[in-house]
Image (cartoon, rainbow, N blue to C red):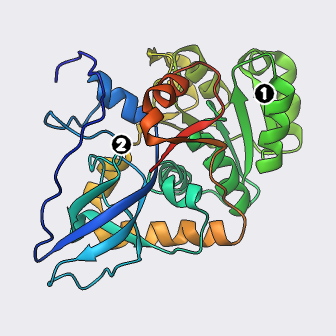
Amino acid sequence: MGTTAIQPRVKNLELAAVGGSDVRVRMLAAPINPSDINMIQGNYGLLPQLPAVGGNEGVGQVVAVGSSVSGLKPGDWVIPANAGLGTWRTEAVFSEEALIAVPKDIPLPSAATLGVNPCTAYRMLRDFEQLQPGDSVIQNASNSGVGQAVIQIAAALGLRTINVVRDRPDIHKLTSRLKDLGADHVLTEEELRKPEIKTIFKDMPQPRLALNCVGGKSSTELLRHLAPGGTMVTYGGMAKQPVIASVSLLIFKDLRLRGFWLSQWKKNHSPGEFKGLILKLCDFIRQGRLTAPACSEVPLQDYQRALEESMKPFVSLKQILTM
């Protein structure tokens, strides 16, 4: 695929017959995530053989199952077990192990956006530092899909969040939206650089965990505010600039730099563990502690408009294709 961008287009295909372990699925809804755009542009850690169907996440309903399928039945809701399934389509035949059943009593947008961003948020909050209720976390790109999930899951776990966003014309609207989700503090990149910011740490401990999806200057600022011995986890690079860590911070504060990629986490864990993670998040959704990111539902045939919208700067709405 190289790094040349692919031009997506709609194509009609004949579906294969449903064999022994096959499951026929009618797709209901599938979001457009930054990783999907990266995949189309050819600069992602996992690239499909072309021609390929876009979309790594979404929810569908089982229409029919083959004779040897035991875990799924018609009517069940399913999400992809792994990236690369190709969810931007109306119907498909998948193998049973490519799918995970999810409860039907959660909202459709939540089910469609369950498999990537909230999973990433939960694992990053759990796997790098042993955080206790009352501890704090700092993150950038706080209004991204992962950022919104971090705010809500952290609040459910009793953690406090310092949320950094880029300044924008409607910053007050964004700030109050993130506070409604459970954010303790919302700051612009510029505010984070001001010396007065230290007053925040009078009423909460310095964060031991920083979550970085931007890179460049933004990640350098996060590191400055980490507690000694703390960890910064990088899971994206929206600024397309390297993470620059000062030598003195690394030596005198003994900070750790780590990376996180959900696809790698899944490779290191069993399908059962991933399913357990999904069900844990479904509990949060049912308790009203985890909502889908603010989204705009677009019919599949208007995919071109949805792709353009999802690439605009400062867009706080996730585009979800509905079939």
Q: What's the amino acid at mark 2?
A: Gly
Q: Residues within 10 Å of mark 1 (few under 14, many from 20)?
A: some
Let me know if residue 65 appears in the view. yes
Q: Which residue corresponds to the image point at 31% horizontal and 39% vertical from the top-left?
A: 54
**In which quadrant is the N terminus drawn?**
top left
Q: What's the amino acid at mark 1?
A: Leu
Say which residue label 2 marks: 55
* Residue closer to the observer: 91 or 44: 91
Distance between mark 2 and mark 1 Cα atoms: 32 Å
Residue 148 horizontal/vertical position (percent): 65, 44
Disc 1 secondary structure class: strand
Disc sitting over residue 187 in the figure: 1
Q: Nearer the viewer, mark 2 or mark 1?
A: 2
Residue 57 horizontal/vertical position (percent): 40, 50
Q: Which residue corresponds to the image point at 17% horizontal and 78% vertical from the top-left?
A: 66
Residue 212 sits in which quadrant? top right
> Up-down: is 276 above or below 134?
below
Taking the image as shown, residue 8 lies to the left or right of residue 152, namely left
Q: Which residue corresponds to the image point at 53% horizontal and 16% vertical from the top-left?
A: 246
